[in-house]
Amino acid sequence: MLDAVVVGAGPNGLAAAITCAAAGRSVLLLEGGEAVGGGTRTAELTLPGFAHDVCSAIHPMAAVSPFFADAQLDRHGLELVHPEIALAHPLDGGRAGVMHRSLEDTVAGLGVDGRAWDRHVGWAARHWRQIAPGVLGPLTRVPRHPIAMAGFGARGALPATVAGRALSTDEGRALLAGASAHSFLPLQRPLTTALGMMLLASGHVAGWPAVRGGSQVLADAMAARLVELGGTIETHRPVRSLADVPDARAVLFDVSPRQLLSICGHELPSAYRRRMARFRYGPGVWKVDYALSEPVPWENEACRRAGTVHVGGTMAQIAAAEAEVSSGRPAAHPFMLVAQQSLFDPTRAPAGQHTLWTYAHVPHGYEGDATPSMEAQIERFAPGFRDTVLARHVAGPAWYEAYNPNFIGGDIAGGSHGGLQLALRPRAGVRPYRTPNPKLFLCSASTPPGGGVHGMCGHHAAVAALATTLR
């Protein structure tokens, strides 16, 4: 009998398998698709020679993840590369908010907003070692550094639209709004500031890098590390029920709560099944990948040197767009995440040409077409953009759910961050990774700390299994 079987080879499934194997346990990782990685994959989606990240692209959370810090993945080909500028946020009139990896440069560039930035984002960056265990793990535990966590909570509890009042300029407020919108929530919701601060602070701690060669390289490095530790990986092994899982002392699922119930609901108490059935999923994404003949002609020069560009205008405009999506309507002027990996990683496109990675939030299961409104937003800040397009690949919620069953309704974040699900996912309780069945564990982004490529959901679930069933 195996010690552990992990179902699903996304970054959290890989992290769970590596953690168990590093502890000396026998591990089998089952993946239904043709390759490991889940959302952390790269493919030629448009034209030959153009390497596009299928889902995750920029990796601030991987750069600060305690799991990745110990995983020794550089020996297996992983290299994080940094752009000249971490983040730019264009505004009308050729202006832009700019976040550098250097806190000092960012504060200086923000002018009158520099002091407020330093009090909030700078404070979180300087206290990152103290707050990281809390923001990258379940909040149900007593914090190791309660004073620092209280300070982070005091700064992050407010809605982003309220916290933004501490900033005086469109540039400073837009930077906060764009980072906070990664929550997939209306910016009028409490705690959206905390999510924005966490991302921005991580940029000052370790930058907002990409993986040289594409995100698939990260997944492949994790797979190589697992094999090095004695683990086994089998692809093309879909798991539809426990009958598809070999005998093992523990089974860890990198799946959504809905899939967990489909696979093994009969092995779980009815009360637990009801609570998991109430798990809420968030908005979907509409993603367009481009092959370009030249870099995007942004009006603002800093945007031409940034790895990540947040497109959506002012804080008020972004808040309005996210509120529309939350209410079930596509935003007329959407907020967009844009990544320009080929500017600082020449392996992504043929010489002289470029890739562009973009997505916007859309209502859950959206069946329309957000491409025209997204391209209009880019043209707003980069006139002539359409003239650079050689080819495009469009992927909406249905495409993403077919690509990865975890992405229900196009939700790539593992479930809504609204309400108690921000901290208490997948259900209220002090044991988020353990099910009532001592053999079964959940290790996906539907557990703390949620979405993002950090591996911490899988790592924490494996630690829980090693402390109980796999002792």
Image (cartoon, grey):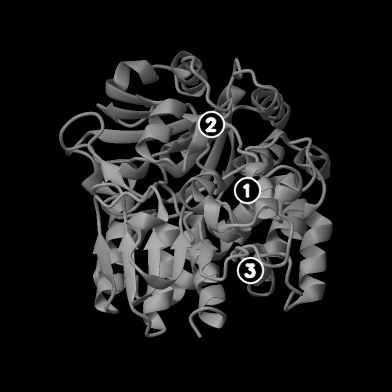
Crowding at mark 2 (Cα within 10 Å: few <14, some 14-19, many 20+): many
Q: Secondary structure at mark 3?
A: helix
Q: Answer yes or no: is residue 367 visible.
A: yes
Question: What residue would you read off at disc 1?
Answer: 109
Q: Residue 430: x percent and y percent?
A: 72, 67
Q: Please report whichever mark, 3 or 2, sits nearer to the chain's N-terminal start.
A: 3
Question: What residue would you read off at disc 2?
Answer: 284
Q: Nearer the viewer, mark 3 or mark 2?
A: 2
Q: Answer yes or no: is residue 396 visible.
A: no
Q: Amino acid at mark 1?
A: Gly
Q: Please report whichever mark, 1 or 2, sits nearer to the chain's N-terminal start.
A: 1
Q: Residue 387: x percent and y percent?
A: 32, 16
Crowding at mark 3 (Cα within 10 Å: few <14, some 14-19, many 20+): many
When the figure is inspected, residue 462 is found, relative to residue 207, above or below; the finding is below
Q: Please report whichever mark, 1 or 3, sits nearer to the chain's N-terminal start.
A: 1
Q: Secondary structure at mark 1?
A: helix
Crowding at mark 1 (Cα within 10 Å: few <14, some 14-19, many 20+): some
Q: Amino acid at mark 2?
A: Gly
Q: Quadrant of the N terminus?
A: bottom left
Q: Quadrant of residue 294?
A: top left
